[in-house]
Structures are given as C-alpha cells and as structure tokens.
Image: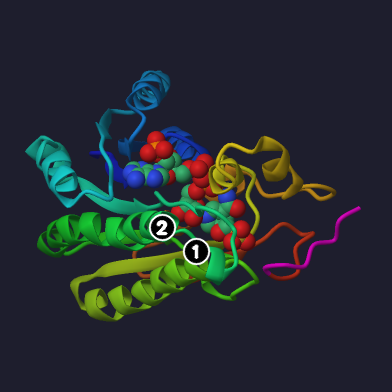
C-alpha cells in the first residue's frame, strides 16, 4: 500500500521537527516547510535514512505568493497522496502589555499564526475534497483557551486558530475531512527564544523549576490523532506539563 503523505509547516525546529521524525518512523512520507533551508535539507537527509520520501519547501508562510508557488511545485503524484496537513508554523513575538506592544510584532504573529494557516489550508483543502479524505491538525495553544497578562495579540491569534479549527470542522466534515485542534501548554522548543528575541536568559526562565513538555510529547499526540480508525475523529486536545495548572500557574520547585 502507498504510504500516506503528511505536510508539516514549521518543521525546522521544535514540535514540527519532532513530528517529522515520529511520522517518518511510522510509515509516512513528508512535505516539510519553514524558512531555514539548510535545516530543511539536513532534516531531509536524516529522514531519508528512515526510508521516508521527503520534499522540502523553504518559504515564508506570511507571503501568499510564495505559499502558492511552493505548493504548486510539489509533483502531482506526491501532492495527490497528501492526507494530513499539520498547521504548526507559528510564533509569539514579545511579551509586552497592550499599550507597549510593537506593531511589527503584532503583524508578524497575525500574518504567521492566522494568515499563514489560511494561505496554506485553502490550497490543500481542495485536494482533500477531491480525495474525499483528509486530516487537518491545527497547533493552537493553551493561549487559545485562556488569555494572560501581556499575552494579548499572541492569545488573540491562538483564539483565532481555535475558532478556525471549529469552523473548518463544521464546514468540512461532510467532505470526510477531520480537523484536530491541539492546544499545548509550555513546550521547551525555540519558542521562548523567539518570543524574547534571542534573550536566552529570559527564555530559559520560562521553564525554571518544572519539567516542560518536549516537542516529542506533542508529536506523540499528533501521531495518535492521525492513526485512529477512519470512523474516529479526535477534535480537541489540551496538553500541558503535569506541573502546569492553567496558562499561568506552575508548580515550580
Ligand atoms: P519553534 O520556534 O521551535 O518552531 C516554530 C516553527 O515555525 C519553526 O520551524 C519556524 O521555521 C516556523 N515558522 C515561524 N515563522 C515562520 C514563517 N514566517 N514562515 C514559515 N515558517 C515559520 O516553536 P514551537 O515548535 O514551540 O512552535 C510550533 C507551534 O506550536 C507554534 O504555532 C506555536 O505557537 C505553538 N505552540 C508552542 C508552544 C510552546 O510552548 N513551545 C505551546 C503552544 C503552542 P523557520 O524559522 O525556519 O521559518
Ligand atoms: C505557547 C504557550 O503559555 O506561552 O503557546 O502562551 S504560552
């Protein structure tokens, strides 16, 4: 039987990269995206040793023209086998109070987390409709379930992802397309380093005194969701470290 193909956005690091490894080990071929081309090439080489066929597409998901041209470059025989889209590329930029927020940070988060997800989904959904099959995994966040001080626009973008997961599900389930919303709490990836713009000391403090999730922990949930029997749909999962009670409460020791 032909292997399924999963398209993972934001596979150069963190949750996306861990998911690429786990799906390759579990009989998936892959299309991997992200801006950092060298990282994508290195990942392709590693995953090909696991016998996965891998296509890498380096582009900026904030740019619709780049997204259209990347998706059109996928060879037809590979494209029609895509049955899983993992909308993972995303970021928080800054952790400022609303009145101190930078417009450039707001735009980067809105353009990546919301518009990027829409740009790529609208290109893949027609394939799923044609195939009468498909699975969209949206990586939202606990920040899409709650808001917290100085989380403002990041929380708004993840609430948008949560709303889109529910809206996509209602619009697409009659086409046999399922939508899974995954909302992680604290996962130690490059997320905090990006949020605090390279300030490693502040980034590391995020995880002081407790054991955060890893990208692999979230990847396992994704693998579970995409390997259920065809009649089962996992709709929404909130996963946190055991030491996290809600978006802002941590049992730090
Ligand atoms: P990382 O920073 O480790 O990974 C983010 C990925 O997104 C990278 O591969 C990056 O690739 C990609 N990305 C960012 N901007 C763009 C862009 N403009 N175009 C294309 N790709 C882009 O963080 P995580 O793995 O933690 O984050 C993955 C997702 O999980 C995000 O949506 C995040 O909001 C969400 N999340 C993270 C949590 C956490 O605590 N870490 C908790 C809850 C949700 P590149 O830079 O090469 O373009
Ligand atoms: C990332 C988790 O709590 O920093 O989405 O917003 S949090």
- Residue range corresponding to the magenta coloring: 247-253
Q: Residue furthest front?
A: 100
Q: Secondary structure at mark 2?
A: helix
Is ligand 1 closer than 8 angstroms to the Cβ of mark 2?
Answer: no
Residue 116 picture location, percent across and down? 29, 55
Image quadrant in which the N terminus is located: top left
Q: Secondary structure at mark 1?
A: helix
146 on left or right of 64: right
Between residues 14 and 233, which one lies in front from this camera angle?
A: 14
50 on left or right of 7: right
Residue 121 picture location, percent across and down? 24, 59
The residue where tag 1 is placed is: 154
Q: What secondary structure is the stretch in magenta mostly built from?
A: loop
Evaluate if marks 1 and 2 touch, with contact meaning CB atoms under 8 Å apart.
Answer: yes
Against 166, residue 127 (above or below) is above
- The first of marks 1 and 2 along the sequence is 2
In percent of the image, x 36 and y 70: which residue is there?
Answer: 231
Whole-angstrom CA distance, mark 1 to mark 2, is 7 Å
Q: Is residue 31 magenta?
A: no
């Amino acid at each position: 039987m032909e292997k399924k193909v999963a398209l993972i956005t934001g596979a150069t690091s963190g949750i996306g990269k861990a998911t690429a490894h786990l799906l390759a080990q579990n009989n998936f071929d892959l299309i991997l995206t992200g801006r950092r081309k060298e990282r994508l090439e290195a990942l392709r080489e590693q995953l090909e040793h696991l016998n996965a066929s891998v296509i890498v597409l380096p582009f900026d998901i904030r740019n619709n023209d780049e997204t259209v041209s990347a998706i059109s470059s996928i060879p037809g025989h590979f494209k029609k086998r895509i049955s899983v889209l993992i909308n993972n590329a995303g970021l928080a930029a800054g952790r400022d109070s609303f009145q101190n927020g930078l417009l450039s940070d707001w735009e980067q988060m809105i353009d990546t987390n919301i518009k990027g997800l829409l740009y790529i989904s609208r290109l893949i959904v027609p394939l799923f409709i044609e195939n009468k099959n498909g699975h969209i995994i949206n990586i939202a966040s606990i920040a899409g379930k709650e808001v917290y001080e100085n989380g403002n626009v990041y929380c708004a973008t993840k609430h948008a992802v949560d709303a889109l997961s529910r809206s996509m599900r209602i619009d697409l389930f009659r086409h046999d397309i399922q939508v899974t919303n995954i909302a992680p709490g604290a996962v130690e990836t490059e997320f905090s380093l990006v949020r605090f713009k390279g300030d490693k000391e502040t980034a590391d403090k995020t995880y002081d005194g407790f054991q955060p999730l890893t990208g692999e922990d979230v990847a396992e949930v994704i693998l579970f969701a995409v390997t259920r029997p065809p009649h089962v749909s996992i709709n929404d999962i909130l996963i946190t470290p055991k030491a996290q009670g809600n978006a802002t409460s941590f049992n730090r020791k």
